[in-house]
Image: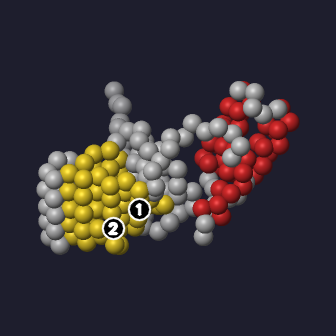
Amino acid sequence: MSQSQMRVSDEDRERTAQQLQQAFAEGRLTQLELEDRLEIALTSRTYGELLGLIDDLPTDQPQVDDAVELESQNGTIKRAGDWAVPRRLRAVSKYGSVELDLSEAVITHPVVDIELDLAYGSAKITLPDGGVANVDAFQSEWGRVHTGDVPGRPRAGAVHVVISGRTKYGSLTVRYPRRRWLGR
């Protein structure tokens, strides 16, 4: 199934509606164009329908490389906060670890492929809420692979992370962000 045929979520529809309203506020769309496009946006079922509504408008989305390789001999490879996630990410480290926090990242495609090549290090991947991860293609000879309550099958509207690769002595942990409780 192509990305344009994938079903969209309410959040996707809302994000597109906000882009259309911003374009109207900037004078890029007339009132009639805004109304017509909003009606379609709020009833769209696929990404193809949504993208057709905004493809003639400028975008503030950062440009994302299709494939990125991160490498370290013994340090920690770490990405967190507001960063652009490529479609394919390869992390290589002989003695170090990998920490990828996708919970606040910009992810512009429904499937992210992460390949880990670790000899002695471990990896921790934090998914955005609702994300899913397939770890079937990851091997750990002496460590463990832990996904907790993270589902492995694709879900409509959720980012799907496919993790492959290996570690000899390390482990892989895939989880959701920790909740911070403010209590008094």
Residue at x 20%, y 57% (from the top left corner):
93
Residue at x 20%, y 66% (from the top left corner):
167
Residue at x 42%, y 38% (from the top left corner):
82
Q: Position of residue 70 (x, y in %)?
A: 29, 52
Q: Which residue is mark 2?
A: 164
> Are dots 2 and 1 in contact, CB under 8 Å?
yes
Amino acid type of the residue tagged 1 in the rendering: Asp
Q: Secondary structure at mark 2?
A: strand
Q: How many marks?
A: 2
The image's mark for residue 21 is none
Residue 63 appears in the figure: yes
The image's mark for residue 113 is 1
In the depicted view, which residue is nearer to us: 122 or 88? 88
Q: Position of residue 125 (x, y in %)?
A: 32, 54
Q: Residues within 10 Å of mark 2 (few under 14, many from 20)?
A: some
In the figure, is residue 157 to the left or right of 34? Answer: left
Placement of 24 over or under 129, stated as above or below: above
**First in residue order: circle 2 vs circle 1:** 1
In the depicted view, which residue is nearer to us: 124 or 94? 94
